Image (cartoon, rainbow, N blue to C red):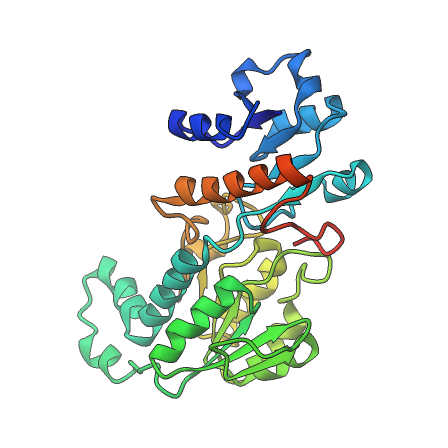
Amino acid sequence: MKILDLFNLTEQQQTKLAGLGDVQVIEPQDLNDNNSKEIDAIYGWDAHAEEVLTASPKLKFIQSNSAGVDYMPLSEFQKKGIILANVSGIHAEPISETVIAYVLSFARGIVTTAAARPDKRWVGDQVRMQNYTLKNRTAVIFGTGHIGEAIAEKLQFFGTRTVGVSRHGNPVAHFDEVVTDDQGTDRAAKADFVINIMPLTPATKHFFNKEFFDEMINHPVFINVGRGPSVDTQALIDALDQYKLAGAGLDVFESEPLEKSSPLWEMDNVILTPHISGGFQEYGAEAFDILYKNLASFIQTGEVAVNKVDLSAGY
């Protein structure tokens, strides 16, 4: 079993993988025309993986080091019978904490105060009476998986009503209500916070568009920690300009890095973070735990133990 390491396995981790049997870890700098044809599995994804996908008839398992896999050639995996797994689940805590940081920044006047700081304006009297608490507010969360559920749980702690939106509309813990996609816009229109954590699929590309934002009658804060292309950027900018939205917290964008010419940089009611909401110091260790479990299972059974991606659905 030869595995191409594209996510910087430590020596200790490589030793642990070797304990599974005849497992040989190949680093990208050691990849050549000969051994690229012998790769059975890949950990991570980059241009080296694209080369191996073409070269190796033995490639049958790929362990992504991310939750989203929309940047991978899923249809090619299907044709070649390749199993793909992701690291879904490890992002729930860091991303949900980021969302709470965004929400509190708007609710408690931090965004407005920060905007006044460059001009050294003391805006206490103005901001104090605009502040609000999260009790009895409503958050509509598009996506009710691990991350959506973690966000809902934290918001409920503050007394916020949580509404989930999913394809199935089935009940999920920590959501006061779960509705289907076709009901989501109606619920979002009356919300205080609209939060996107959906995966990127053909159905979710530009899901948040002009028609969606035009329906927002309660001027909610829009938060995107899902995928950038789920949002029509120009429609979002227009909605902010026209006060259809009270503000936005954005961690992902249609084009990354965000273009320096984007008006979003200059908007006082927008929080921008550079696609960091899922990051945390223990990321490598937690991702490896999933790789180890899946590789052990794959060697024994030809199947993975957890987080198998539905290649047709895209997540």
Q: Residue at x 71, y 34 (%)?
A: 60
Q: Residue at the right extreme? A: 79
* Residue reaching furthest to the bottom: 136
Residue in view at x 66 percent, y 36 percent: 61
**Image quadrant where one finds the N terminus:** top right
From the viewer's side, name the closer residue of 58 and 124: 58
Figure quadrant of residue 246: bottom left
Across and down, in percent, residue 295 comes to 58, 37
Left or right: residue 280 versus residue 243 is left
Who's the residue at 40% across and 82% down the image? Answer: 160
Tell me if I can see residue 134 in this picture.
yes
Report the side of 79 relative to 190 (left or right): right
In this view, 112 is above or below 258: below
* Quarter occupied by the C terminus: bottom right
**Between 264 and 208, which is closer to the camera in this rendering?**
208
Image location of residue 216, percent across then percent down: 56, 80
* Residue 215 shows up from this direction: no
**Rendered view: 302 above or below 30:** below
Of residues 91 and 115, which is closer to you in this image? 91
From the top left corner, tell me how far across and down residue 168 is, in percent: 68, 74
Image coords of residue 284 (percent x, y):
42, 39
